[in-house]
Image (cartoon, rainbow, N blue to C red):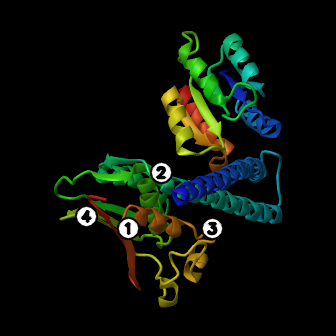
Amino acid sequence: MDDILKIKAENEELKNINLVRSDLISISAHQLRTSLSASKWILKMFLDKDLGDITSEQENLLNKAYESTERMIMLTNEMITLNHTEDKILSFNFQDVDLVELLEQTIFEFYGESHKKEIELIFLKPSSILNKVSVDKEMIRVVFQNLVENSIKYSNIHGKVVISISQNEDEIDLSVRDTGITISNDDQKHIFEKFYRTENAKQKDAIGSGLGLYTTKKIVENHKGKIWFESDEKGTTFFITLPLNN
Amino acid sequence: MSKILVIEDDSFLQSLEASKLTKEKFEVITASTGDDGMKKINEEGVALILLDLMLPNFDGFDILKKVREQETTKAIPVIVFSNLSEESAMQKAEQLGATKFMVKSNFTLEELVTEIKAILK
């Protein structure tokens, strides 16, 4: 009996420590964003010549400072998502979700971005209606966002991204196929590690935190699902399965 | 000229937001606390409220709730402009009747102006 009480007390203490950690990250991120907003807005004012003409050398440096600020903002955003994911793992809010609808909404958010890069974004809708699946909607939205965003980010101009979803006996299968950069054999085993970025990815897009796929895998596995990928010179396809009864 | 109320407790961000909106030919009034913001909402007849969430005394959610409860203010568009991005904050703002939720660091002031103009159209 004493042992059970002890374990319960320790468990409570761990939960409290986790709460303090989470609050600390949340507050720091908020403060960081406030300073970063100010920097971003000021740099943009200079770049837009709201404050008068600038030389091309100044413009070049200001552009670099602006990109660097955007990188910090993105890193902060991903840190917040990861922190939120780690919190949510302790208390997922499961509800029955229409994944086709959620995927459609997510893809819609990226039409602007894909249009800018002249990338064809194709959604192969299933021919029949899929069962609703019990998932944490906001967390699965993060998974969809990360995969679609990566496929656009790492595709070449005039590329193609094909997204499909289907239902098999006891699971939902999703794939996101792009015509982008290859993930080398050496990189393949590290791709889901925290802060890991491949050389190809860094060259393609300097802005990236290496937290997206780590977070994605964590969320999928916490839904008892699986995530993997295949990559060759034609591009990369990410696959996800989510069990219908998890 | 539409009158916009900027409720923001960070004086530097407030000055940047106000100066951009003034440049875009809006009439801008500002408040740094929730109480002062609420007072100006009731007295100034504003066309749109740009609302931060973390404010001293009376926070952004309290203001939004009050604005939507009062007959005289319930139709005023409110853009929540905050650096909070937790799902719970977004959901709460939506439930309380925010017109739009924008995370400050993810937008430029031009994008904010575009959004304001679209709402006031």
Disc with the residue nearer the chain's start (3 vs 1):
1
Residue A50 rendering spot, x and y as whole percentages:
78, 45
Amino acid under disc 3: Ile
Query: Disc 2 vs disc 3: which is toward the camera?
Result: 2
Density class for disc 2 (Cα within 10 Å; few <14, some 14-19, many ≥20) is few
CB under 8 Å between discs 2 and 4: no
Q: What whole-number distance in Å separates the C-alpha atoms at marks 3 and 1?
A: 20 Å
Please tell me which residue is depicted at 45% across the width and 54% down the height of the picture: A139
Amino acid under disc 1: Val
Please tell me which residue is depicted at 82% across the width and 56% down the height of the picture: A54
Whether residue A26 can be seen here: yes
Query: Disc 1 vs disc 4: which is toward the camera?
Result: 4
Would you name the residue on which mark 3 appears? A207
Would you name the residue on which mark 1 appears? A161
Q: What whole-number distance in Å separates the C-alpha atoms at marks 2 and 1?
A: 33 Å
Q: Quadrant of residue B43?
A: top right
Q: Which mark is residue B92?
A: none
Disc with the residue nearer the chain's start (3 vs 4):
4
Q: Is residue A87 left or right of residue A159?
A: right
Residue A136 rendering spot, x and y as whole percentages:
40, 51
Q: What whole-number distance in Å separates the C-alpha atoms at marks 3 and 4?
A: 34 Å
Q: What whole-number distance in Å separates the C-alpha atoms at marks 2 and 3?
A: 31 Å
Residue A141 rendering spot, x and y as whole percentages:
43, 54
Would you name the residue on which mark 2 appears? A91
Amino acid under disc 4: Glu
Circle 3 SS class: loop
The reply to whether label 3 and label 1 mark residues of one chain is yes
Would you name the residue on which mark 4 appears? A171
